[in-house]
Image (cartoon, rainbow, N blue to C red):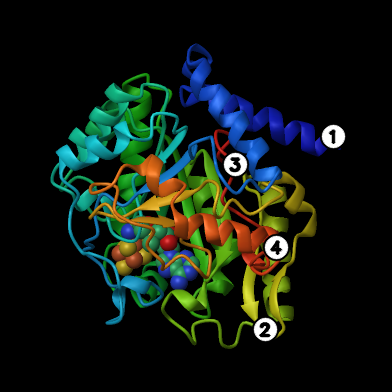
Amino acid sequence: MASRIINRLRKLRKFLRVGGWQILCRPRVIANYFLNQREQRAKAVVMKSLPSKVEMEISGKCNLRCRHCLRSYSHYPRPQEFITLANFEAILKQLPYTVTLTLTGAGEPLLHPDFLKIVRRARELLPHLNIVVYTNFTLIGKTVTAHELVRSGVSQIHVSLDAASADVYRQVRGADAWDHIIEGIKELLAARSQLGARRPLVGTDFTMMRDNFHQAPMYVELAYKLGVDYIAYPSLLMTSWGYSDGAEGMTKSALIKVMEETRTVAQKLGAPMPIEAYVADPDGWFSHYEELRSNYFENCMFFRNQIQIDAAGNFRLCCRHPGSSHTYGNVLEKPFSELWNGPVIIAARQRQVAGEIPLPPCGEVCVVPDPPLAP
Ligand SMILES: C[S@@+](CC[C@H](N)C(=O)[O-])C[C@H]1O[C@@H](n2cnc3c(N)ncnc32)[C@H](O)[C@@H]1O
Ligand code: SF4
């Protein structure tokens, strides 16, 4: 109980730090947020609220070919292009109640030639936004400098490490970029303090797979020493997302052992990290750290929040859900408000209410944090 309250207070502090207080001046955004929560709980079929959590894949292109990533495989189904600034604006204007806007899908956002313009425009259009970027960070100092990133108004930067050493990084991500990324994180933190800025919050990510899972404890230690604001949970490979045999050899007992070690390291250091694990093992999906369920959203947001729009304007639902490859229309061709309650999605919601679409395993342990209290 006490740890839950502490956790909530911590999240609230971060929320205020990334500029969340600006929401207080926007009653419609708040009203939509709470209506959306109610509609999710009630499993509404027709949604009166709009999503508060939106992922816009501004870049469908990438400069890496990580072995675990869907987009490195030939059957990759999505458009590999950059969104234009005009289209970005046209889409965001249709989603005025967004609270957390993630500028990443499957692709590298810092590769977008107008990345800074996009962030600034988002901030101008919706000043209250929690703007989040997931990045491989290999292009820091090349397409964008650390100072530019701080000045842009982005709220959170998640740097995907997926390793704790240069050799494992190369094995997983196929690039000799380790030293550059680590230096880049240091530069970003230094630029933030030089400029006296409160944001962006800087965090690291680690997707566990056969090739790197033994490094999870080392990853926590490394990230802690770097002084990042949060160390995201080591999450587990979605085998359906590419590297299909990448979980081989990660037995449940080996994984639990590594997670225990990781947790011990984090506790010893006092590292700011929630640990969560989920994976498709031979018995189905499992969550090791059951107690963390209550810290996250207790229900799957699929169908009613947490939407994705790709670089060509196609509207999809949460990318972690097994049914995410379906497109519900294009928001550049038809207004989002129509698609959001279009016949296909309504039929899907009806089937879900009737129990014909069970909650997916990831839904039980959803690690997509509920906005605006992102990790
Ligand atoms: C798809 S990438 C896009 C952003 C950016 N290019 C990057 O690498 O951070 C976002 C995150 O998804 C993770 N990811 C890629 N393939 C995955 C998979 N099969 N299972 C789980 N996470 C995966 C990456 O490691 C990365 O942390
Ligand atoms: S994980 Fe990120 S960097 Fe790696 S291929 Fe996928 S989109 Fe690119």
Mark pair 2, 3: CA separation: 30 Å
Mark linked to residue 2: 1
Residue pointed to by mark 4: 354
Name the residue located 16 percent from the left edge and 46 percent from the top edge.
143
Q: Nearer the viewer, residue 226 or 2?
A: 2
Secondary structure beneath dot 4 equals loop
In space, the residues marked 4 and 2 are separated at their CA atoms by 35 Å
Residue tagged 3: 370
Residue at image location 32% in from the left, 23% down from the top: 194
**Mark toward the start of the polypeptide (4 vs 2):** 2
Q: Position of residue 299 (x, y in %)?
A: 68, 51
In the foreground, 139 or 156: 156
Q: Is residue 127 left or right of residue 368?
A: left
**Position of 244 relative to 68 (above/below):** below
Report ligand 1 position as a quadrant.
Answer: bottom left
Going by the image, does 65 lie left or right of 306?
left
Which of marks 4 and 3 precedes in the sequence?
A: 4
On residue 251, the disc is 2
Viewer-side residue, 367 vs 219: 367
Secondary structure beneath label 1:
helix
Looking at the rendered structure, the kind of residue marked 1 is Ala
Q: Tell me the amino acid under the disc marked 3.
A: Asp
Horizontally, is 178 left or right of 28 in the view?
left
